[in-house]
Image: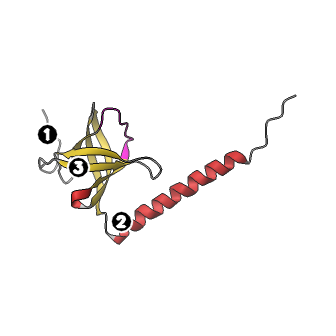
Amino acid sequence: MIERRQTARRRVCLGGRVTIAAFLPEIDCVVRDVSLGGARIGVPAEATLPDCFDLFIPCRNETRRAFVAWRAGATIGIGFAETLAASEPAALARRLADSEAEVTRLRAALLGGNDRAPACVH
């Protein structure tokens, strides 16, 4: 097997939560084999994850933007885009701005659907 990691990994067993969008429920996961560049996580078999999401690790009070590198059933290899402590003001401001933008976009989509004139039937 070819080793593709650029940094050493450390075996851990940490609880984590995957956040996909503000309006969707979080998904509990188990974080394993962490390195500076990524990790291996285990999610419930019925969980469907997009290619990019936020991973929150409560015991470290850390949120990382993650992207899927590979999938094998309920096990997913992820890479980290950046590391931010969840309590840092910049991280909180970014997450709040992202959430507000998402709410604005969804509100516009919902209201835009109500502005259409009913279809005429002849």
Q: Position of residue 57 (x, y in %)?
A: 26, 55
Kindly identify the amino acid type of the residue bearing the numbered disc 2.
Ala
Judging by the rendered image, the residue that carries numbered circle 2 is 91
Q: Residues within 10 Å of mark 1 (few under 14, many from 20)?
A: few
Which of 86/79 is in front? 86
Judging by the rendered image, the residue that carries numbered circle 1 is 3
* Front of the two marks 1 and 2: 2
Q: Position of residue 116 (x, y in %)?
A: 75, 44
Badge 2 element: helix
Kindly identify the amino acid type of the residue bearing the numbered disc 1.
Glu
Q: Which label was assigned to residue 19?
A: none
Quarter of the figure with the N terminus: top left
Badge 1 element: loop
Kindly identify the amino acid type of the residue bearing the numbered disc 3.
Gly
Q: Are marks 1 and 3 in contact (CB under 8 Å)?
A: no
Above/below status of 90 relative to 109 = below
Q: Position of residue 48 (x, y in %)?
A: 37, 36
The region drawn magenta spans: 44-52
In space, the residues marked 1 and 2 are separated at their CA atoms by: 32 Å
Residue plotted at (22% across, 60% down): 60
